[in-house]
Image: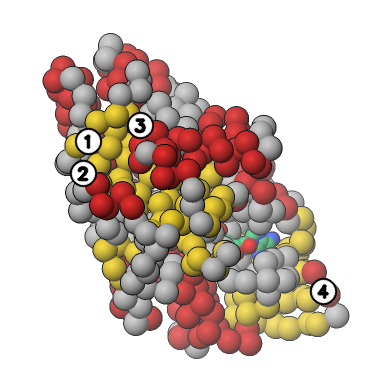
Amino acid sequence: MTEITRDVVIVGAGPSGLTAATRLKAAGLTVAVLEARDRVGGRTWTDDIDGATLEIGGQWVSPDQEGLLEMLEELGLETFDRYREGDSLYITKSGELTRFTGDIFPVAPETEAELVRLIEKLDAMAAEMDPDRPWEHPRAQELDTVSFEAWLANETQDQEARDNIALFIGPAMLTKPAHAFSTLQALLMASSAGSFTNLVDSDFILDKRIIGGMQEVSKRLAAAVGDDLFLSSPVRRIEHGPEGVVVHADGGLQVSAKRVVLAHAPVLYSRISFEPPLPRRQHQLHQHLSMGFVIKVHAVYDRPFWREQGLSGTVFSPYQLCHEAYDNTNHEDERGTLVAFVSDLNADGVFELSAEERKERILDSLAAYFGPEAKNPVVYYESDWGSEEWTRGAYAASFDLGGLHRYGAEVRTPVGPIHFSCSDIAGAGYQHVDGAIRMGKLTADQLIADLT
Ligand code: FDA
């Protein structure tokens, strides 16, 4: 049994928990960070697989992500541009492969007009929202009780326009089918990135990567936390009261503190036993948040062969198993890497198959865009976060239909000495490392104000 006492104990050594920990330490408070896994970084994880360095989790940085950009500056980390020279590819419902440039897919003029109209409309609706307070949107209740799929069906008869707009928010972002989340939740996704236009623009939202990988953010923060970080220490039980908390982790580690910060995905709150139990409202609201589900596929080739054909590596189709893919070649790497995504219902489907069949189906989908050469990667890997006990899905959590206006306002409210900090409850930067960092700073600021 190891018993220690700190001002604040933080559960989770992802970017949010580690941001909070370093801020608190810098303000002179004592901390302990307890992490279930044997590594830091949470959903950011840069690893070598069969000799290739892969970003198994979060990786991209966009220009609006001020929390993350400031952090990169502080940590002395540099970025590089995602490769984007040349044509992108789109596959129609009938299987026709088309090259294009710009943001709007090569569709019939009337469908293009519908896409432009819907994007403008969603931009205007997202602009009415403060991403930190989506429940205050003037039509919050109305928009939160209609699924994004139903909203789109009411907006346009053009099926291809609907399928593409649904793709941007559903498979590509919340990684849930568009019938499973509300229009208000869709607007939060757009508004948290600045606008719907930003989300649609892959050159904006997937602008840069970090040299050395995204996990380096957490590794450098962890170095500043030093011996106050305890790996392989899943927290199982938290006693709490007006005097503070006693946090119990595996291995007989027990931390007494004035406050605790739960810095992990909300779906994992219920993995911890709280004594006394959390209030009724939290019991209810936590059940209305669930993880999306996506497979991130990495295919490394001896060279980036698509570039020889004048292709950027950027592809989209709501009708393909891999609904989007990008050139994900590492900084100064001679080999070429494609990263592709298989989302929600499609991911369910391929996980019914054997690993060999799944790989074949996924590579067939890549070959539909890039030709037969795509079928022969030298390294192939699927990031399967659904199987990770301490995450349980990807990319992040969102509310079910009606949950955001009903419970959203309380998602960050502390319960006595228990605070909450995670990308999944952020406003700006929601579901991204940027949001995790912003929440870490916000939580630390509140605690510094309370405790110093
Ligand atoms: P995070 O989940 O990262 O960390 C929480 C930590 O808490 C974990 O280490 C976990 O083990 C630990 N924990 C949980 N329960 C515990 C317990 N009971 N006791 C102790 N420890 C516990 N973002 C982005 O900005 N750009 C991108 O390109 C992508 N792409 C992307 C791809 C994929 C495949 C994924 C899975 C995610 C992304 N993301 C992303 C999202 C991004 O990775 C995510 O938003 C942040 O990692 C969230 O950081 P947090 O610190 O909030 O949680």
Towards the viewer: 126 or 132: 126
Q: Is residue 211 left or right of residue 419?
A: left
The amino acid type, in three-letter code, at marker 1 is: Arg
Mark 3 or mark 2: which comes first in sequence?
A: 2
The amino acid type, in three-letter code, at marker 3 is: Ser
Q: Are marks 1 and 4 in contact (CB under 8 Å)?
A: no
Instruction: Write down the residue under mark 4.
Output: 251
Instruction: Write down the residue under mark 1.
Output: 99
Above or below for 33 versus 261:
below
Towards the viewer: 290 or 90: 90
Q: Are marks 1 and 2 in contact (CB under 8 Å)?
A: yes
Crowdedness near tag 1: few (<14), some (14–19) or many (≥20) residues, C-alpha within 10 Å: some
Q: Distance between the Cα atoms at labels 2 and 4?
A: 54 Å
Mark 1 or mark 4: which comes first in sequence?
A: 1
Q: What residue is rendered at 47% in x and 80% in y?
A: 220
Which one is in front in this view, the residue at disc 3 or the one at disc 1? 1
Which one is in front in this view, the residue at disc 3 or the one at disc 4? 3
Can I make out residue 331 in this image? yes
Q: In what element is the residue under mark 1? A: strand
